Amino acid sequence: MSRPDRTPSANRHQRIDRFLGRCAAELERLVDHQPTLEAATALADARGRARPLPFEPSWLPVLDSIELVTGSGGDRADEEHLPGAFVGIAPDLPWIPTPRADDGGTDLALAPLNTAFDLGPTTVGVMYVGPGRAYPLHRHPPQELYLTIAGTGRWRYGGNDGFRPVEDLRTLYNRPGDLHSAVADDVPIVALYILWP
């Protein structure tokens, strides 16, 4: 797949904000414990004060597998559902190779949305793990919640020592310092991440 057509820059921030709104609504639907509620609140607060920042969208080689994303959703392969909404917005995002791997974006990618919006102390972005690839095991001081948007795979999260199967449209919480990682099956893993103080 070649680099896709992009939305004109005047509409880009609006489209990304709509996508974040869809993610926020999904988080509210999935609230099952206090950290999910806190992450949903942090995302809502960040969106409420967000100021657009100038940025250029980008594309990385791993994203050429994006047509597999909606395959994980079956009848959800349209923009009415989160996997399809992601596929629609992906060309407009500021993709970068993850600093946690030296693959240049052939296996893994991040779209740090704090480069598109000033979101204050909340860090928000999208993680993309190519088919059959693993995101490196890592930890960080802020707590983090993932909303799995598409793909199936195995995740290490929440202080667990091993990997557990996780499907799309789930929330995964990591306390400060928890080791965590993800390994994609034959469909890319796409997840929104939220880190908040």
Image (tube, rainbow, N blue to C red):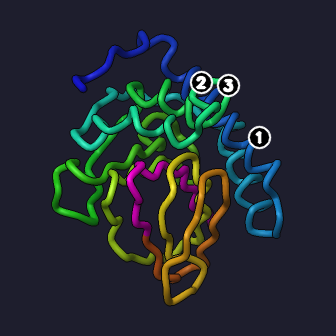
Asked if disc 2 and disc 1 are in contact, CB closer than 8 Å, the reply is no
The quadrant holding residue 95 is top left
Q: As drawn, which residue projects farthest toward the front?
A: 74
User: Magenta segment, which residues?
Assistant: 182-197
Residue at mark 3: 80
Q: Please, what is the three-letter code of the amino acid marked with disc 1?
A: Ala
Q: Is residue 193 magenta?
A: yes
159 vs 107: above or below: below
Q: Is residue 80 magenta?
A: no
Label 1: which secondary element: helix
12 vs 195: above or below: above
| Whole-percent x, y for residue 121 in the image | 58, 56
- Image position of 54 (left or right of 62): right
- Mark 3 nearby-residue class (10 Å; few <14, some 14–19, many ≥20): few
| Whole-percent x, y for residue 6 in the image | 37, 16
- Mark 2 nearby-residue class (10 Å; few <14, some 14–19, many ≥20): some
Residue at mark 2: 78
Q: As drawn, which residue projects farthest toward the bottom?
A: 161
In primary-sequence order, the first of circles 1 and 3 is 1
172 vs 149: above or below: below
Q: Residue at x 58, y 20 (%)?
A: 14
Which sits in the foreground, 116 or 154? 154
| Whole-percent x, y for residue 20 in the image | 63, 36
Q: Please, what is the three-letter code of the amino acid marked with disc 3?
A: Glu
Residue 25: image tag = 1
Quadrant location, the C terminus: bottom right
Asked if disc 3 and disc 2 are in contact, CB closer than 8 Å, the reply is yes
